[in-house]
């Protein structure tokens, strides 16, 4: 296992007193993206030889290769790599003969100072200043959900959207990290070349009441031809209580549980069915694992989603202002208040697909729920598609893992 060494921090016992410099780098490298500079070992017997790459004066160093320092005839005592005075992370080998930095920001100047020490106590210091290659297609994160500091439900996915298509998904995925104070197993999935999504294993949601941190060390990562990441990003959010709500279109009741304990039950009226388009009954509520996606008070609901003018009453046109509405799919399913159908709630399904609820119950759910809460609906013959909103748990775990560039599950410990 390699030992991490922050730039500017000495390895091992470090040096005491003044550093005696036997040899320093003058100019080195080939002036572009390659080469290196090697000094020491010849000026005086027993002096360690140190190699730094990129070499001094390099003008087009590749950001993804970072900085490499090696020592022969001694061990590395200290490496400092800085950009605008700020240190760059690196890893020291167990033998303390090699040091490797992380990826570097494109189009930036870096300064390197490396010190090695021989068994006889003699030291060599090497310096290098170089500039990394500029990128004509910078890769950046355009959006991350959830928001910074947000309290979310136990089903909450992490959705990362990029500003451009990613060619090398493996390189980008390697730069992504998810850590939580309570361990979970999850995986990344690429629904497109511009978005990647992390979720936990099917049936194993986030453990409640904990912190989760997402980080993307993208700066310098080569995402494609002439495309490099330009910035890192970190996002921290909180998992709240476990809110699991179940609803049956057959019993016409909803039950909400907090941390496994039932806290409320109320009657509902689900989708009535009867409007079939391309073999799909669009008036049926979908059965499956939904996640709450957002809240609207009020929500403006119209028949335009099915191509019917709201004024065309003969063909089912409608426009309604609905209070206390919590969205659970992308196709317009909500759990919301509906005073006009309280006569049917618990008795008959009369909605266009939403879960009509008594106003008091809908208001309670609206105030109680977080984004990312789990709502499991059963009883309908219309299934929920895995990409209908945030319904990612509808995809099998094996298929989800295979949809990642690295085809692997990860732990957040």
Image: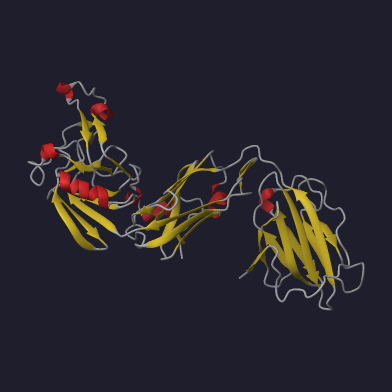
Image-quadrant location for residue 357: top left
Residue 382 shows in this picture: no
In the picture shown, does residue 78 fall above or below 134? below
**Residue 210 placement (x, y as % from top left):** 39, 62
Residue that appears at 16% across and 44% down: 359
Colour logic: secondary structure
- Quadrant in which the N terminus is drawn: bottom right
**Residue 266 placement (x, y as % from top left):** 14, 51
In the picture shown, does residue 266 fall above or below 95? above
In the picture shown, does residue 386 fall above or below 209? above
Image label count: 0
**Residue 396 placement (x, y as % from top left):** 35, 53
Q: Relative to residue 253, is residue 178 drawn left or right?
A: right
Residue that appears at 19% across and 59% down: 263
* Furthest residue in direction bottom, as rendered: 120
* Residue closer to the observer: 225 or 330: 330
Q: Relative to residue 149, is residue 154 drawn left or right?
A: left
* Residue closer to the observer: 251 or 336: 336
Image-quadrant location for residue 20: bottom right
Residue that appears at 25% across and 37% down: 298
**Residue 146 placement (x, y as % from top left):** 41, 49
Residue 144 shows in this picture: yes
């Amino acid at each position: 296992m390699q030992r991490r060494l922050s730039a500017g921090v000495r390895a091992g016992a470090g040096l005491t007193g003044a550093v005696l410099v036997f040899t320093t780098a003058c100019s080195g490298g080939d002036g572009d993206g390659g080469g290196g500079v090697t000094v020491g070992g010849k000026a005086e017997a027993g002096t360690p030889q140190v190699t730094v790459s990129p070499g001094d004066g390099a003008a087009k160093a590749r950001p993804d290769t970072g900085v490499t320092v090696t020592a022969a005839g001694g061990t590395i005592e200290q490496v400092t790599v800085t950009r605008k005075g700020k240190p760059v992370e690196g890893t020291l080998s167990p033998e303390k003969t090699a040091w490797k930095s992380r990826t570097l920001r494109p189009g930036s100047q870096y300064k390197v100072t490396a010190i090695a020490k021989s068994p006889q106590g003699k030291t060599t210091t090497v310096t290098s200043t170089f500039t990394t290659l500029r990128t004509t297609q910078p890769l950046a994160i355009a959006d991350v959900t959830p928001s910074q500091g947000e309290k979310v439900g136990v089903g909450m996915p992490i959705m990362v959207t990029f500003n451009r298509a990613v060619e090398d998904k493996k390189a980008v995925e390697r730069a992504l990290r998810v850590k939580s104070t309570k361990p979970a197993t999850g995986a990344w999935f690429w629904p497109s070349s511009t978005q990647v999504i992390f979720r936990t294993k099917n049936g194993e949601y986030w453990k409640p009441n904990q912190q989760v941190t997402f980080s993307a060390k993208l700066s310098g990562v080569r995402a494609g031809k002439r495309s490099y990441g330009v910035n890192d990003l970190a996002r921290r959010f909180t998992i709240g209580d476990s809110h699991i709500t179940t609803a049956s279109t057959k019993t016409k009741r909803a039950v909400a549980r907090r941390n496994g304990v039932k806290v409320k039950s109320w009657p509902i009226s689900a989708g009535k069915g009867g409007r079939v388009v391309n073999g799909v009954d669009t008036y049926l509520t979908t059965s499956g694992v939904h996640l709450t996606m957002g809240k609207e008070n009020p929500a403006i609901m119209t028949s335009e989603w099915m191509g019917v003018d709201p004024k065309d009453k003969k063909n089912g046109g409608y426009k309604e202002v609905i209070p206390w509405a919590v969205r659970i799919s992308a196709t317009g399913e909500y759990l919301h208040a509906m005073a006009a159908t309280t006569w049917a709630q618990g008795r008959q399904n009369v909605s266009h697909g939403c879960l009509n609820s008594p106003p008091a119950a809908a208001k309670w759910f609206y105030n109680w729920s977080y984004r990312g809460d789990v709502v499991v609906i059963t009883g309908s013959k219309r299934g929920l598609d895995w990409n209908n909103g945030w319904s990612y748990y509808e995809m099998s775990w094996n298929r989800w893992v295979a949809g990642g560039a690295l085809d692997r599950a990860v732990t957040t410990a």
